[in-house]
Amino acid sequence: MNKHTLAAALGLALASGATQAAPAKNVILFIGDGMGPTVLTATRLYKVGEEGNLEMMKLPYAARVKTFSHDAQTTDSAPSMAAYTTGVKMNNEVIGMSSDTLAVAPGKDANGNKSINNCTSDNGTAVPNLLELAKAAGKSVGAVTTTELTHATPAATYAHICHRDAAYAIAAQAVPGGAGFNQALGDGVDVLLGGGANHWTPYGPGNKKGRADGRDLTAELSAQGYHYVTTKSSLAGVNAGKVLGLFSATSHLDYDLDRQNKGAASTQPSLSEMTAKAIDLLAGNDKGFFLMVEGGRIDHALHGTNAKRALTDAVALDEAVKTALAKVDLTETLVVVTADHDHTMTINGYAAKGNPVLDLVKDKAGTPALDADGKPYTTLVFGNGPNRPDTRPVLTSEVVTADDYLQETGVRLDSETHGGGDVMLFSGGAGSTAFKGTIDNTQVFGKIKAALGL
């Protein structure tokens, strides 16, 4: 990353936007990772039925967004989210860099962890992102996710790197004053909430996926005045200042279905709880704020062809949207809800109205539809993924509506892939009228930037 190039570009961007009207003081950008149109429809059917609407669908303006990356018809989350935050098309796997940046896989340390950043200074240049622009304008900024905080989508809000898997190097970019810090963030991101504490803490007997460099980034951030919290109760106790919340020792937060099943035993906050706290903390800045909120595990459940967990996580995102709308003034706040890419899930057959979307395809009398071999099939199926048996079993409603059921797929792959389809965007509040028609994902950046007057 060329810090001088980034600083110069950041200065030019601020200068060029100084005279623009700014209808929005604040922006909240919600991302449903992998929440393509079919996922949205299935979530609506799952939550409120055919005639209802999700909270996000009640927003007054809508657009269709093209998601292809610089080098691929079907994008991965790194360049698609970075297109939203920078306005630049990037190659798959690349975060926050110019279009000519080549993805270079990170190396592994002695413990086998992907921690060595193999990016070289002559491989592209960093490009300014919305958090940096907002921070330079005096606003507070935050990123909230149900994934690891170093995962592609949250990383695209604060980091610049040639490969999304260099998670340990990505984490270092968020630590003011530390080696590798992204100086364009000024005094740092104000609110960071998610999972994956191992990327922020040193390797040790109880932390085999910890940092090989021995740094404790949680301690470094605490020394910079951050509150470091690891449970929903400790998060609830933070009422002012900056906060780093890491709610899983390794990997991501629980799927919302599993968090709910644990009940009081769960120490992880819901996405709605994290969203509410982030808004409360950021709203204290009279110059406004920019907040990104990601329902990241929608994507993970889809990769595994587990529709039930995907839909419950999409519902959790929708509830977070409802929470945010109840807390902000839309005359000064722009709310945007979209997805970074599609998946291959589809709604299949001619199920009767009111038939549960996770169930078998059934007619009005409750009789299952049958395939050419005389066997029932589900409403939701995937174009590809791990669950394509050589001989289809005889499915029952009890089997297919269970928490762990994996929908059947057309093409057999180890993991279901992203889809290349366009995604939906919903917007409301200050500056929301700009979001309409069919637009490229890079244009979302420009519209948010203009709304904030950056």
Image: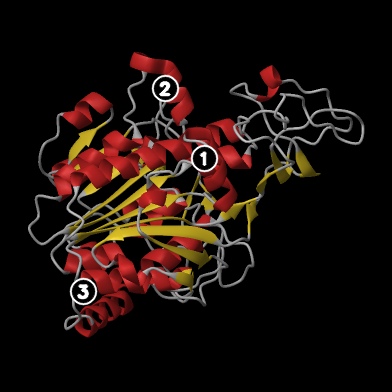
Identify which residue is drawn at 47% across, 23% down: 258
Disc 3 to disc 1, how far (Cα)?
34 Å
> Tag 2: Cα neighbours inside 10 Å, few (<14), some, or many (≥20)?
some
| x, y percent for residue 227 | 17, 38
- Report the mark closest to the observer, 3 or 1: 1
**Mark 3 or mark 2: whose residue is earlier in sequence:** 2
Give the residue at the far front of this rendering. 365
Residue on which disc 2 sits: 260
> Tag 1: Cα neighbours inside 10 Å, few (<14), some, or many (≥20)?
many
Residue on which disc 3 sits: 453
| x, y percent for residue 177 | 20, 56
Horizontal relation, residue 356 to residue 197: left or right = right
- Report the mark closest to the observer, 1 or 2: 1
Say whether marks 3 and 1 touch (CB < 8 Å).
no
Disc 1 to disc 2, how far (Cα)?
17 Å
| x, y percent for residue 157 | 34, 58
Name which residue type carries label 3: Gly
Q: Secondary structure at mark 3?
A: loop
Identify which residue is drawn at 64% across, 67% down: 73
Horizontal relation, residue 307 to residue 218: left or right = right
Identify which residue is drawn at 18% across, 63% down: 186
**Mark 1 or mark 2: whose residue is earlier in sequence:** 1
Q: Is residue 68 visible?
A: yes
Name which residue type carries label 2: Gln
Closer to us: 70 or 332: 332
Closer to us: 371 or 208: 371
Image: 333 above or below 405: below
Q: Which mark is residue 43?
A: 1
Q: Quadrant of residue 435?
A: bottom left
**Mark 3 or mark 1: whose residue is earlier in sequence:** 1
> Tag 3: Cα neighbours inside 10 Å, few (<14), some, or many (≥20)?
many
